[in-house]
Image: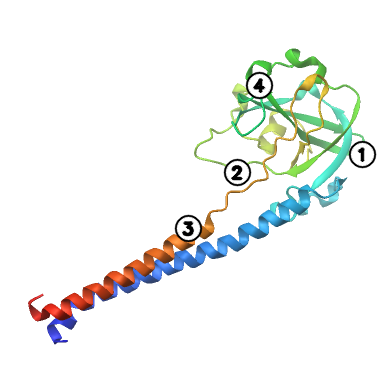
Amino acid sequence: MTAAVRRGLLLPLLAGTVAFLILVGLGTWQLQRLAWKEALVARVEARVHAAAVPLPPPGEWPALTREGDEYRHVRLSGTFDHARETLVYTVRGEDAPPPRGQGYFVITPLVRADGPPVLVNRGFVPQDRGAPDSRREGQTPGAVEVTGLLRFSEEPSLFVPANDAARNAFYRVNVADIAAARDLKGAAPFLIAADATPNPGGLPIGGTTRVAFPNRHLEYALTWYGLAAALVGVGIALAVSRRRRGPAA
């Protein structure tokens, strides 16, 4: 190989090497994400299907974390304060049993004798059944026991509007926003997503928590590695072609 050919290959070789390292790095990162996602799914499945345990006492609340405690299966008792319920706009997808479409999550404070109030996501109601008077049977009076999953506030999203308490318009299940809007001083920093135990009259429909997580990390990793292999192939073909053509290339 002549000096001219080597000089002509130097810049493409450097650029190709950088691109190759980036592609391999992205593939490796996706494999790491795959291991993390599989561990997350296993952890959530174990918590969801475990027997319900008493809600942690208030002294432990500050130490609760998403990684360590979300989806914990718990039980608690108290009385629903239906006068301070909050409707959070949502859409029930086609993969869910009917009713589907636009509607609300019904978030209701559970007033407890042995601790601060806890918000409970009682489940879904269709948009035309948002008004409490349209589902009076489900406005359960007196002492109740709730079993469900411990959840934290939904993460912010560019595709979901921010809550507007002044307009009583809520689009995200955000515990701090709802507690402040309903003047729930000292409320738990999490909420409980009620299980599918039927409510009188059929509404709200509990058990709406999705525990399925998309996992395409292996597919993404193979894509990045495939692109890296293709880049190597193109580089080899280019080098062979230039070598055969000589300095004129």
Q: What residue is disc 1 on? A: 114
Residue sticking out furthest to the bottom: 2
In the rendered structure, which amino acid carries the disc numbered 3? Tyr
Badge 2 density bin: few <14, some 14–19, many ≥20, Cα 10 Å: few
Report the residue at 37% width, 69% height from top.
Answer: 229
Confirm or deny contact between disc 2 and disc 4 (CB under 8 A).
Answer: no
Residue at image mark 4 = 126
Q: Which residue is mark 2?
A: 155
Instruction: Give residue 50's position: percent from left, percent from top.
Output: 82, 50
The amino acid type, in three-letter code, at marker 1 is Asp
Q: Are marks 3 and 2 in contact (CB under 8 Å)?
A: no
Q: CA distance from mark 2 to mark 4?
A: 24 Å
| Image quarter of residue 193 | top right
User: In the rendered view, does 28 fall on the left or right side of 4?
Assistant: right
Q: Amino acid at mark 2?
A: Glu
The image quadrant of residue 171 is top right
Q: Is residue 67 above or below residue 185?
A: below
Q: Is residue 45 above or below residue 100?
A: below
Label 3: few (<14), some (14–19) or many (≥20) C-alpha neighbours in 10 Å: some
Q: Earlier in the sequence, mark 3 or mark 2?
A: 2
Mark 1: secondary structure: loop
Q: Position of residue 131 (x, y in %)?
A: 70, 16
Task: Tell me which numbered mark, 3 or 1, is placed earlier along the sequence.
Answer: 1
Residue under pointer 3: 220
Q: Secondary structure at mark 2?
A: loop
